[in-house]
Image (cartoon, grey):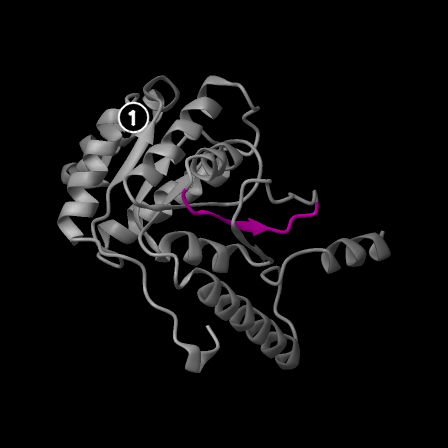
Amino acid sequence: MTKRIRSSLTMCSVLDRPRSRWKELHFALKAFYELIRGLRTFHFLGPCVTVFGSARIQPGAPYYRLAEQMGAEMVRMGFCVITGGGPGIMEAANKGAFEAGGVSVGCNIRLPSEQMANDYLHRNVDMKFFFIRKVLLVKYSYAFIIMPGGMGTLDELFETLTLIQTGTIKGFPVVLMGMEYWKNLLVLMDDLAKAGTIDRADLGLVLATDEPEAACAHIHKHAIERFKLRERRKRLWLLAE
């Protein structure tokens, strides 16, 4: 029993327990390296939109097709499209962007189940640490599209909203796609406002819609117009970029 417990602990993440100073330093250096690698990969993309959603939605499903359409629409508006780089909704959004002639980027996470990057990426970076991955998925985007998803998608949604609510990032538009899917969440958020645990004004941080046209108009107004978005950065040969 003791051997089994110790063996399972060694498979856990770096957050499972205190370790020696040297191991903690090694972890910090690995995380720093991964962050720098991600920053260099994404720095020249220009304005981006991040699409969050489930890896379990199958090709051909209605929400898959909707994510594919949204990926294409974002490209037509001049954005690069970033996703978690995996299958399902992520693949759909990347596919829409890729086939529309835009820039399609993935920030894939390495999992025990070996989530593989999808086939519609011009650029991809494989990550080991979830928290570095989430920084990169938020850092370069001027809008966030939340497609149907599970725990991971909810985590990404509420972390993004918290960053906006607290002023950690600017008030970028957040769009929930799929009214039927998200209806219970919208009721819950309204209940939170009634209970006083969130400000009622916070409900205005999210646009919920089924219509790509409404989503695009919202993003155009609150991202492109508000932030006067310009072309991507130029590379500096001196930094070997």
Residue 219 at what x, y percent from top left?
23, 39
Q: The magenta stretch spans which residues?
A: 102-112
Residue at image x 59%, y 78%? 25
Is residue 17 depicted above or below 23 in this figure? above
Residue 51 at what x, y percent from top left?
40, 40
Residue 106 counted in the magenta span: yes
**Residue 80 horizontal side relative to residue 227, left or right:** right
Residue carrying label 1: 212
Residue at image x 57%, y 29%? 56
Residue 39 at what x, y percent from top left?
44, 65
Residue 15 counted in the magenta span: no
How crowded is the residue under tag 1: few (<14 C-alpha within 10 Å), some, or many (20+)?
A: some
Please tell me in which quadrant of the rendered image residue 93 appears.
top left
Residue at image x 85%, y 51%? 1
The answer to whether any part of residue 102 appears in the image is yes
Residue 23 at what x, y percent from top left?
65, 76
| Closest to the observer, 92 or 241 | 241
* Amino acid carrying mark 1 in the image: Pro
